[in-house]
Amino acid sequence: MVASVPFADPNQPLEAMPDPQTIARQKDGYMKALDDEFNQGTSSLSQQIQARKQMLTEMATQRKAEYNAQMEAQVAAQTLALDQQYNQQLMMLQQQAAQQKSCLEQQALKLTMEYQQKSNAEQMAQQQAAMAQQQAMLMQKQQDEMARLAVQQSQLAGEYYALAGGVPGPMPVPYAPMAAAPLGMMPSTPPMTAAYPMISPRR
Protein backbone atom coordinates (compact mmCIF):
# COMPACT_ATOMS: atom_id res chain seq x y z
CA MET A 1 0.00 0.00 0.00
CA VAL A 2 1.15 3.53 -0.76
CA ALA A 3 1.65 5.70 2.33
CA SER A 4 -0.88 8.46 2.74
CA VAL A 5 0.16 12.04 1.99
CA PRO A 6 0.99 13.94 5.24
CA PHE A 7 -1.14 17.02 5.75
CA ALA A 8 0.55 20.30 6.79
CA ASP A 9 -0.36 21.75 10.06
CA PRO A 10 -1.93 25.13 9.39
CA ASN A 11 -0.53 26.45 12.68
CA GLN A 12 3.05 25.85 11.52
CA PRO A 13 5.04 28.76 10.34
CA LEU A 14 5.51 29.25 6.63
CA GLU A 15 9.07 28.12 6.68
CA ALA A 16 8.01 24.73 8.11
CA MET A 17 5.38 24.21 5.46
CA PRO A 18 6.35 22.56 2.12
CA ASP A 19 6.48 24.83 -0.84
CA PRO A 20 4.49 24.18 -4.01
CA GLN A 21 7.44 22.53 -5.77
CA THR A 22 7.87 20.11 -2.91
CA ILE A 23 4.16 19.44 -2.85
CA ALA A 24 4.16 18.80 -6.61
CA ARG A 25 7.22 16.55 -6.33
CA GLN A 26 5.65 14.59 -3.49
CA LYS A 27 2.38 14.40 -5.38
CA ASP A 28 4.11 13.05 -8.46
CA GLY A 29 5.88 10.46 -6.33
CA TYR A 30 2.72 9.37 -4.67
CA MET A 31 0.89 9.32 -8.04
CA LYS A 32 3.61 7.17 -9.52
CA ALA A 33 3.48 4.86 -6.52
CA LEU A 34 -0.29 4.66 -6.87
CA ASP A 35 0.04 3.92 -10.58
CA ASP A 36 2.62 1.22 -9.91
CA GLU A 37 0.48 -0.30 -7.21
CA PHE A 38 -2.55 -0.16 -9.52
CA ASN A 39 -0.60 -1.76 -12.35
CA GLN A 40 0.70 -4.49 -10.04
CA GLY A 41 -2.81 -5.13 -8.71
CA THR A 42 -4.22 -5.17 -12.21
CA SER A 43 -1.50 -7.53 -13.41
CA SER A 44 -1.94 -9.80 -10.38
CA LEU A 45 -5.71 -9.85 -10.82
CA SER A 46 -5.33 -10.54 -14.53
CA GLN A 47 -2.93 -13.37 -13.81
CA GLN A 48 -5.30 -14.84 -11.24
CA ILE A 49 -8.25 -14.60 -13.63
CA GLN A 50 -6.23 -16.11 -16.45
CA ALA A 51 -5.08 -18.93 -14.17
CA ARG A 52 -8.64 -19.63 -13.10
CA LYS A 53 -9.81 -19.49 -16.73
CA GLN A 54 -7.02 -21.87 -17.71
CA MET A 55 -7.98 -24.20 -14.91
CA LEU A 56 -11.64 -24.07 -15.94
CA THR A 57 -10.66 -24.69 -19.56
CA GLU A 58 -8.51 -27.66 -18.58
CA MET A 59 -11.27 -29.03 -16.37
CA ALA A 60 -13.81 -28.57 -19.18
CA THR A 61 -11.45 -30.20 -21.67
CA GLN A 62 -10.91 -33.12 -19.32
CA ARG A 63 -14.63 -33.50 -18.68
CA LYS A 64 -15.32 -33.26 -22.41
CA ALA A 65 -12.73 -35.95 -23.06
CA GLU A 66 -14.24 -38.14 -20.37
CA TYR A 67 -17.75 -37.50 -21.70
CA ASN A 68 -16.65 -38.13 -25.27
CA ALA A 69 -14.95 -41.36 -24.23
CA GLN A 70 -18.07 -42.42 -22.34
CA MET A 71 -20.31 -41.55 -25.27
CA GLU A 72 -18.00 -43.31 -27.71
CA ALA A 73 -18.09 -46.41 -25.52
CA GLN A 74 -21.90 -46.26 -25.39
CA VAL A 75 -22.10 -45.74 -29.16
CA ALA A 76 -19.69 -48.62 -29.75
CA ALA A 77 -21.72 -50.90 -27.46
CA GLN A 78 -25.01 -49.92 -29.13
CA THR A 79 -23.44 -50.33 -32.58
CA LEU A 80 -22.22 -53.79 -31.65
CA ALA A 81 -25.68 -54.72 -30.36
CA LEU A 82 -27.29 -53.43 -33.58
CA ASP A 83 -24.78 -55.38 -35.68
CA GLN A 84 -25.56 -58.56 -33.74
CA GLN A 85 -29.29 -57.96 -34.13
CA TYR A 86 -28.82 -57.31 -37.84
CA ASN A 87 -26.84 -60.52 -38.29
CA GLN A 88 -29.46 -62.55 -36.43
CA GLN A 89 -32.34 -61.09 -38.42
CA LEU A 90 -30.38 -61.46 -41.65
CA MET A 91 -29.77 -65.13 -40.88
CA MET A 92 -33.48 -65.63 -40.18
CA LEU A 93 -34.41 -63.92 -43.45
CA GLN A 94 -31.90 -66.04 -45.36
CA GLN A 95 -33.29 -69.23 -43.79
CA GLN A 96 -36.87 -68.19 -44.60
CA ALA A 97 -35.91 -67.29 -48.16
CA ALA A 98 -34.10 -70.64 -48.59
CA GLN A 99 -37.10 -72.54 -47.24
CA GLN A 100 -39.50 -70.67 -49.51
CA LYS A 101 -37.24 -71.25 -52.51
CA SER A 102 -37.03 -74.95 -51.66
CA CYS A 103 -40.83 -75.16 -51.39
CA LEU A 104 -41.19 -73.36 -54.72
CA GLU A 105 -38.69 -75.71 -56.34
CA GLN A 106 -40.54 -78.75 -55.00
CA GLN A 107 -43.92 -77.37 -56.11
CA ALA A 108 -42.56 -76.53 -59.56
CA LEU A 109 -41.00 -80.00 -59.87
CA LYS A 110 -44.24 -81.67 -58.75
CA LEU A 111 -46.36 -79.62 -61.16
CA THR A 112 -43.91 -80.30 -63.99
CA MET A 113 -43.99 -84.05 -63.32
CA GLU A 114 -47.81 -84.02 -63.13
CA TYR A 115 -47.96 -82.10 -66.40
CA GLN A 116 -45.56 -84.52 -68.09
CA GLN A 117 -47.50 -87.52 -66.80
CA LYS A 118 -50.82 -86.10 -67.93
CA SER A 119 -49.36 -85.07 -71.28
CA ASN A 120 -47.89 -88.55 -71.80
CA ALA A 121 -51.21 -90.15 -70.78
CA GLU A 122 -53.15 -87.94 -73.18
CA GLN A 123 -50.70 -88.64 -76.00
CA MET A 124 -50.95 -92.38 -75.32
CA ALA A 125 -54.75 -92.15 -75.21
CA GLN A 126 -54.76 -90.23 -78.49
CA GLN A 127 -52.44 -92.79 -80.06
CA GLN A 128 -54.60 -95.67 -78.79
CA ALA A 129 -57.73 -93.95 -80.04
CA ALA A 130 -56.13 -93.40 -83.46
CA MET A 131 -54.97 -97.02 -83.57
CA ALA A 132 -58.43 -98.24 -82.51
CA GLN A 133 -60.00 -96.07 -85.21
CA GLN A 134 -57.60 -97.39 -87.82
CA GLN A 135 -58.27 -100.97 -86.65
CA ALA A 136 -62.03 -100.41 -86.80
CA MET A 137 -61.75 -98.92 -90.28
CA LEU A 138 -59.60 -101.84 -91.39
CA MET A 139 -62.01 -104.37 -89.91
CA GLN A 140 -64.94 -102.59 -91.54
CA LYS A 141 -63.11 -102.62 -94.85
CA GLN A 142 -62.36 -106.32 -94.47
CA GLN A 143 -65.98 -107.03 -93.55
CA ASP A 144 -67.25 -105.04 -96.54
CA GLU A 145 -64.86 -106.90 -98.80
CA MET A 146 -65.89 -110.30 -97.42
CA ALA A 147 -69.57 -109.36 -97.77
CA ARG A 148 -68.98 -108.42 -101.38
CA LEU A 149 -67.15 -111.71 -101.99
CA ALA A 150 -70.02 -113.60 -100.33
CA VAL A 151 -72.51 -111.92 -102.64
CA GLN A 152 -70.39 -112.82 -105.65
CA GLN A 153 -70.07 -116.38 -104.37
CA SER A 154 -73.84 -116.62 -103.97
CA GLN A 155 -74.36 -115.30 -107.48
CA LEU A 156 -71.86 -117.80 -108.88
CA ALA A 157 -73.57 -120.61 -106.97
CA GLY A 158 -76.92 -119.62 -108.51
CA GLU A 159 -75.44 -119.62 -111.95
CA TYR A 160 -73.90 -123.01 -111.24
CA TYR A 161 -77.29 -124.42 -110.18
CA ALA A 162 -78.84 -123.08 -113.31
CA LEU A 163 -76.16 -124.58 -115.53
CA ALA A 164 -76.21 -127.90 -113.68
CA GLY A 165 -79.93 -128.35 -114.26
CA GLY A 166 -81.01 -127.54 -110.75
CA VAL A 167 -78.92 -130.25 -109.17
CA PRO A 168 -77.93 -129.14 -105.71
CA GLY A 169 -74.22 -128.73 -105.23
CA PRO A 170 -72.03 -127.67 -102.33
CA MET A 171 -73.57 -124.67 -100.59
CA PRO A 172 -71.41 -121.63 -100.11
CA VAL A 173 -70.35 -120.85 -96.61
CA PRO A 174 -72.56 -117.99 -95.36
CA TYR A 175 -70.77 -114.76 -94.44
CA ALA A 176 -70.52 -113.99 -90.74
CA PRO A 177 -69.17 -110.61 -89.66
CA MET A 178 -66.07 -110.79 -87.49
CA ALA A 179 -65.99 -109.15 -84.08
CA ALA A 180 -63.51 -106.35 -83.58
CA ALA A 181 -60.30 -107.58 -82.03
CA PRO A 182 -58.81 -105.83 -78.99
CA LEU A 183 -56.28 -103.10 -79.56
CA GLY A 184 -52.86 -104.46 -80.34
CA MET A 185 -54.24 -107.91 -81.42
CA MET A 186 -55.07 -107.24 -85.05
CA PRO A 187 -56.12 -110.55 -86.62
CA SER A 188 -54.76 -111.52 -89.93
CA THR A 189 -57.11 -111.87 -92.89
CA PRO A 190 -58.75 -115.31 -92.62
CA PRO A 191 -58.36 -117.62 -95.60
CA MET A 192 -61.34 -118.40 -97.77
CA THR A 193 -63.06 -121.54 -96.45
CA ALA A 194 -65.47 -122.04 -99.37
CA ALA A 195 -64.07 -122.98 -102.77
CA TYR A 196 -65.73 -121.82 -105.94
CA PRO A 197 -67.69 -124.76 -107.56
CA MET A 198 -66.26 -126.28 -110.65
CA ILE A 199 -68.53 -125.71 -113.65
CA SER A 200 -68.69 -128.95 -115.69
CA PRO A 201 -70.04 -129.03 -119.26
CA ARG A 202 -73.48 -130.52 -119.89
CA ARG A 203 -73.69 -134.04 -121.02
Image (cartoon, rainbow, N blue to C red):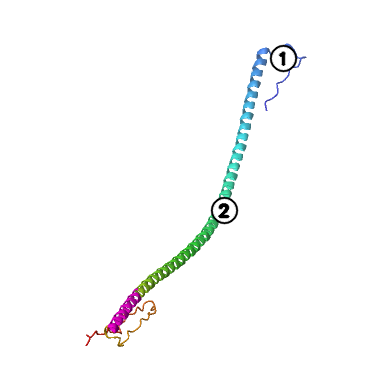
Magenta-drawn stretch contains 36: no
- Location of residue 28 in the rendering, given as x and y in whole percent from the top left corner: 64, 18
Residue named by callout 2: 78
User: Residue 131: horizontal and vertical position, in percent?
Assistant: 37, 72
The residue that appears at 65% across and 13% down in the rendered structure is 21
Picture layout, residue 17 above or below residue 132: above
Q: Is residue 14 visible?
A: yes
Measured as percent of width and height from the top left, residue 189 is found at 31, 79
Q: Residue at x 61, y 32 (%)?
A: 46
Q: Is residue 18 left or right of residue 202?
A: right
Looking at the image, tell me whether mark 2 or mark 1 is earlier in sequence order. 1
Q: Which residue is mark 1?
A: 16
In the picture shown, does residue 125 fall above or below 189? above
* Res. 168 image quadrant: bottom left
- Quadrant where the image shows the N terminus: top right
Q: Quadrant of the C terminus?
A: bottom left
Question: How far, Cα to Cα, is label 2 from label 1?
Answer: 90 Å
Specify start and end residues of the magenta stretch as a single range.
Answer: 141-162
| Mark 2 crowd level (few <14, some 14–19, many ≥20, 10 Å Cα) | few
Q: Position of residue 94 (x, y in %)?
A: 50, 60
Element under disc 1:
helix
